[in-house]
Amino acid sequence: MYIEMVDETGQVSQEILQQTQEILEFAAQKIGKEDKEMAVTFVTNERSHELNLEYRDTDRPTDVISLEYKPELDISFDEEDLLDNPELAEMMSEFDAYIGELFISIDKAHEQAEEYGHSFEREMGFLAVHGFLHINGYDHYTPEEEAEMFGLQEEILTAYGLTRQ
């Protein structure tokens, strides 16, 4: 999995960047998305607030914003077109590979780690996996969806070694 990471805060350690890369690759393998691409941007509460207002019409900062990429093409190609044109096939493959972007608030991660009594590393891993599942179609609007998403989320975090401590 290719993950572009940007630290807008200048506060994210190499260890956290590495952990984020590893846990997202681990989660991707778990749900069969190893061949996908995404972006993760680490932001402040101020930036999170702006993004939350812009994308969710919610006037407060949040811990993670997940923007699922859903390409809308008005054209389609049949398999023969793609076989006859390798450049087109490669372009379509790259187009299909990008799944979305996460914005993780470092400030919120620190606040929530303290509030929930676990490590900052655990909270960052949780937010990355939670956002990753959202951009892959998981949600928690109904009790059934919540049970599925939160169960998978906890399974991934535990298997990776980030348990609540």
Image: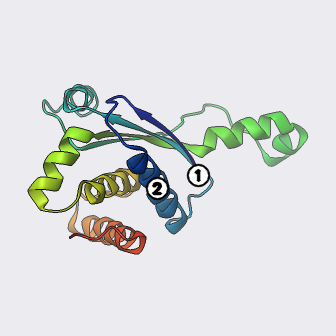
Q: The disc labelled 2 sits on which kind of residue?
A: Leu
Residue shown at 13% from the left, 29% from the top: 59
Say which quarter of the image contains residue 62. top left
Q: Quadrant of residue 104?
A: top left
Vertical relation: 11 (above or below) 109:
above
Q: Which residue is mark 1?
A: 1
Task: Count residues near mark 1 (Cα–Cα under 10 Å), then give few for <14, some for 14-19, many for 20+.
Answer: some
> In the image, is 98 to the left or to the right of 82?
left
**Marks 1 and 2, the one that precedes in the sequence:** 1
114 vs 40, nearest the viewer: 114
> Does residue 120 show up?
yes
Give the residue pinned by disc 2.
24
Which amino acid, mark 1?
Answer: Met
Q: How is the image coloured?
A: rainbow
Q: CA distance from mark 1 to mark 2?
A: 8 Å
Tell me whether circle 1 and circle 2 mark residues in contact (CB < 8 Å): yes
Label 2 neighbourhood size at 10 Å, few (<14), some (14-19), many (20+)? many
Q: Position of residue 138 (x, y in %)?
A: 37, 58
Along the viewing direction, whichever of 108 and 153 lies nearer the viewer: 108
The secondary structure type at the circle numbered 1 is loop
- Tell me what residue is drawn at x 25 percent, y 65 percent: 146
Residue 136 seen in render: no
Q: Residue at x 59, y 58 (%)?
A: 34
Where residue 98 appears, as percent x and y from the top left, is 56, 41
